[in-house]
Amino acid sequence: FKDTSSKKISFDLLNEPSWRDDMNDQLGKKTKLAPEMYRKLIVAAYDTIKGVNKKHLIIADGNNVGNDVITGISALAVGQSCRGYTPSIISHYKASWGYKDPDSLPWIDLKNSGTGVHCGECGCFNKTPHDVFLAWFKDLLGILSENGIGFALWEFDGSFGLLNSGRNDVDYENFQGQKLDRNLLSLLQKV
């Protein structure tokens, strides 16, 4: 992505589409936002935003909670955002909520086709053993880096975070009154 606007404003159109309780089916499963409906929403938002300033950066989260590539919008100057939690048995170990594993290959293929892609969130819940988390995360960051895909840690402070994660198997460093995971910070600094 190259945002050339003077104000550096970007728009992430819809965070994790379909993660809505009112779209559950009768079995209680999350359902995808209809792809054609999502495309129409993206085109309408694109036309409105670009009508005000053609230089604003626009990003659309993949459908199905950021897991599925959005087809039919490649003609638009819209980047797409995926998630970095595969395999979820590691990233969401013992989490009270589930997470569907996406297939990362379509995102790499999309990036290689010329569409901007970034990993809008990634990380690991604090119940995964720290050494397993760090090994897995090093691999994930390597894959993203090798493919020119930037990333955002899900949260800076909290159960997936760099600070105050609540992990029982980390020797935290005191950083301005916060519990810093120095090993995670060191890993992030190498990317």
Image (cartoon, grey):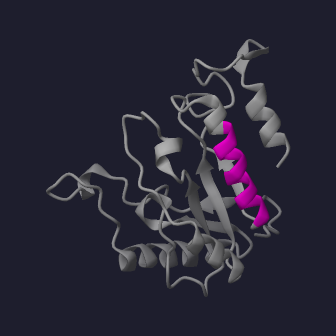
Q: Is 94 inside the magenta-drawn segment?
A: no
Image location (x, y in percent) of residue 182: 78, 26
Q: Is residue 134 left or right of residue 92?
A: right
| Residue 84: x %, y % from top left | 59, 53
Kindly identify the residue that appears in the image at 65 percent across and 72 percent down.
108
- Quarter of the image where one finds residue 171: top right
Could you say which is closer to the camera, residue 76 or residue 133? 133
Locate residue 114 relative to residue 22 in the image: left or right: right
Q: Compared to 7, does 178 lie above or below?
A: above
Q: Is residue 49 left or right of residue 182?
A: left
Q: Is the magenta stretch mostly helix, strand or loop?
A: helix
Residue 156, visible in the rendered structure: no
- Residue at 58 percent across and 22 percent down: it is 167
The quadrant holding residue 75 is bottom right
Placement of 8 over or under 122, stated as above or below: below
- Residue 123 sits in quarter: top right
Q: In the rendering, at what x and y percent does residue 157 appear? A: 63, 28
* Image coords of residue 85 (percent x, y): 54, 50
The single residue placed furthest to the left in the displayed view is 26
The magenta segment is: 134-146
In front here: 117 or 38? 117
> Does residue 40 show up?
yes
Q: In which quarter of the image is the N terminus?
A: bottom right
